Image (spheres, rainbow, N blue to C red):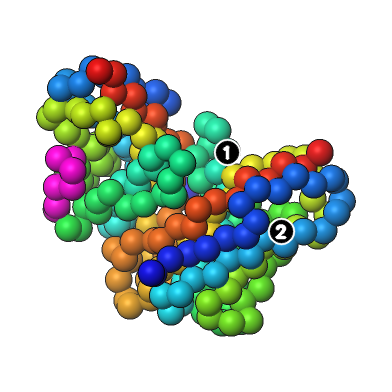
C-alpha cells in the first residue's frame, strides 16, 4: 500500500531532550516536507526536501533540523525541544514530475508534547 | 507575500442545507489551488484541485481570479461531510512548490 508513515505517533518529552521523528514514504517521491499544525494557524511548513541531500527551510524552521540521506526517509530532529514546539506534526511527500498540481500525500501525524 | 485566508473557523449547518466554505488568496501570479480535508482521526487528504475542475463527493470549487477566491461548495450537506477543511495554494517551479495552507474551517453537519 502506497503511504507515508511517521513514528512515533505520540510523544511526551521534557525540555532540552533531543528527539527525532521519523518519516518514510514508499512511493519513490522526490519531494518531502514537514508541517506543524496549530489551532488557528493551520499547517505551516517547517522544512522541505527536493531530493536526496537537498533540503531547505520552510516558514518556521527555527529549532528544527532535517536530513535526507535516502529518498524514502526524511527525519525531523529537535536538538533541544522547547514547550513552544508542542504541536501536531505532519510529514508529506509528492512526486516531482514537473507539475505543481500533484497532490501531497500526508502521514498520520505525530502529536508532540514538550513539558 | 503569498497568503491563504479562510475567514470562518467553524461552519455549522443542518443536513441537506447548502454549504459554502470560503477561501481567499493573495498571490500575483497563477497559483495552483487545492482543498484538503481531514476527517476525524484520519490523515489529511486531497479533496479536489482547481486544475481538474472535478466534483468530488458532491463538492465543487471554482477559481475566481478577479476576486482571488476559491470557495468550496456543496448543494446538500451530509453528516459524513463533517470534517476540517483546508484551502491551500502552491506556486513557482514544481520542485520548490510548497503548500501554503489557510487556517482551516471546521464543518459541522447536524442531523
Q: Residue A90: x and y, percent?
A: 54, 53
Q: Quadrant of residue B86?
A: top left
Magenta region, residue range:
B53-59
Q: In what quadrant of the picture does the C terminus of chain A appear?
A: top right
* Pointer 1 local density, CA inside 10 Å: few below 14, some 14–19, many at least 20: some
Q: Residue at x 57, y 60 (%)?
A: A6
Residue placed under numbered mark 2 in the picture: A64
User: Which mark identifies residue A38?
Assistant: 1
Q: Give the residue at x 80% y 47%.
A: A13
Q: Position of residue A61 (x, y in %)?
A: 66, 56
On screen, residue B35 versus residue A24, left or right, reads left
The residue that appears at 27% across and 33% down in the rendered structure is B80
Position above or below: A64 against A81: below
Q: Measuring 71% from the left and 48% from the top, which residue is drawn there? A: A11
How far apart are the alpha carbons under marks 2 and 1? 16 Å
Was residue A15 drawn as part of the magenta stretch in this picture? no
Between B65 and B83, the one lying in front of the other is B83
Q: Chain of mark 2?
A: A
Is residue B66 something one can see in this rendering?
no
- Please indicate, yes or no, whether residue A41 appears anywhere in the rendered image: yes
Amino acid at each position: 500500500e502506497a503511504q507515508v508513515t511517521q513514528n512515533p505517533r505520540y510523544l511526551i518529552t521534557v525540555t532540552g531532550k533531543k528527539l527525532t521523528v521519523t518519516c518514510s514514504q514508499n512511493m519513490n517521491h522526490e519531494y518531502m516536507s514537514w508541517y506543524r499544525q496549530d489551532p488557528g494557524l493551520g499547517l505551516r511548513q517547517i522544512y522541505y526536501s527536493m531530493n536526496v541531500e537537498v533540503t531547505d527551510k520552510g516558514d518556521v524552521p527555527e529549532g528544527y533540523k532535517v536530513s535526507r540521506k535516502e529518498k524514502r526517509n526524511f527525519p525531523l530532529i529537535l536538538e533541544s525541544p522547547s514547550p513552544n514546539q508542542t504541536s501536531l506534526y505532519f510529514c508529506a511527500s509528492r512526486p516531482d514530475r514537473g507539475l505543481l498540481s500533484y497532490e501531497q500525500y500526508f502521514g498520520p501525524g505525530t502529536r508532540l508534547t514538550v513539558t | 507575500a503569498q497568503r491563504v485566508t479562510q475567514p470562518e473557523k467553524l461552519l455549522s449547518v443542518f443536513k441537506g442545507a447548502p454549504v459554502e466554505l470560503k477561501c481567499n488568496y493573495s498571490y500575483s501570479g497563477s497559483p495552483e489551488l487545492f482543498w484538503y480535508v481531514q476527517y476525524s482521526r484520519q490523515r489529511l487528504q486531497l479533496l479536489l484541485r482547481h486544475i481538474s475542475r472535478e466534483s468530488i463527493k458532491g463538492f465543487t470549487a471554482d477559481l475566481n481570479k478577479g476576486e482571488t477566491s476559491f470557495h468550496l461548495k456543496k448543494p446538500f450537506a451530509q453528516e459524513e461531510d463533517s470534517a476540517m477543511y483546508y484551502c491551500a495554494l502552491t506556486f513557482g517551479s514544481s520542485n520548490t512548490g510548497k503548500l501554503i495552507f489557510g487556517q482551516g474551517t471546521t464543518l459541522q453537519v447536524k442531523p
